[in-house]
Image (cartoon, rainbow, N blue to C red):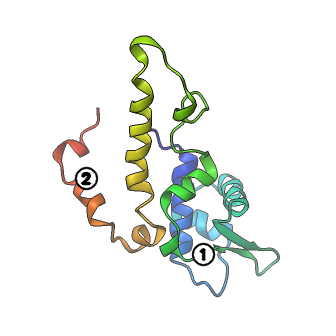
Amino acid sequence: MHVTAKADYAVRAVVELANSSQKEPRKVESVATAQGIPVSFLENILTQLRSSGVVRSQRGPEGGYWLAKPAEELDLAHVIRAVEGPLVGVRGQPPEEIEYMGSAESLKQVWIALRANLRNVLEHVTVADVASGSLPPEVLALTRAEEAWEAR
């Protein structure tokens, strides 16, 4: 899986907002500086996150952004889908809609298995887990295998 800069920035921005006070919004510039994200790029990402209900905003001199719901209720898959769409697509379509013939017929099952595996991680890790540095044990277990750290 290739994680785009947009998805990475979206997750980092949401995690940064999770560590903010819910009493006053965070300015875009503050979040951008804290995470090393270009402001203009972050503004577009936050607009998408607001449209998807991940964050809420307030305009004006006292304005900024907050999480729209508690970080414990917001998983990484939801954040990524808000800016990128479905987790796994094949030529812009969901894998279950693709038809293969002949020797490539079982490829559909490979794409669906890939999506299921991504969901097993991204739908079980919340923004609060990342913000607190306390990932679920089943996710940490996946990182303990030596080959998990090898680029291929």
Residue, disc 2: 142
Residue at 68 percent across and 65 percent down: it is 53
Which one is in front, 49 or 65?
Answer: 49
Residue 144 against residue 18 in the figure, above or below: above
Q: Which mark is residue 69?
A: 1
**Badge count:** 2
**Dot 2, how many residues are within 10 Å of its Cα: few (below 14), some (14-19), or many (20+)?**
few
Q: Amino acid at mark 1?
A: Lys
State whether residue 36 appears in this view. Answer: no
Task: Give percent across and percent down for residue 64.
Answer: 71, 74
Task: Give percent across and percent down for residue 29.
Answer: 66, 67
Q: Does residue 49 appear left or right of residue 134 in this picture?
A: right
State whether residue 84 appears in this view. Answer: yes
**Residue that protrudes farthest toward the bottom in the picture:** 23
Q: Can you say which quadrant of the picture contains the C terminus?
A: top left
Which one is in front, 152 or 75?
Answer: 75
Residue 69 against residue 89 in the figure, above or below: below
Task: Give percent across and percent down for residue 48.
Answer: 70, 56
**Residue that protrudes farthest toward the top in the picture:** 102
Which one is in front, 89 or 152?
Answer: 89
Residue 111 against residue 149 in the figure, above or below: above
Q: Can you say which quadrant of the picture contains the N terminus?
A: top left
Task: Give percent across and percent down for residue 34.
Answer: 53, 67
Residue at 60 percent across and 63 percent down: it is 32
**Dot 1, how many residues are within 10 Å of its Cα: few (below 14), some (14-19), or many (20+)?**
few
N-terminal of the two: label 2 or label 1?
1
Residue at 48 percent across and 14 percent down: it is 101
Residue 148 location, quadrant: top left
**Residue that protrudes farthest toward the left in the picture:** 146
Q: Could you say whether the residue bearing mark 2 is in a helix, strand or loop? A: helix
Q: CA distance from mark 2 to mark 1?
A: 28 Å
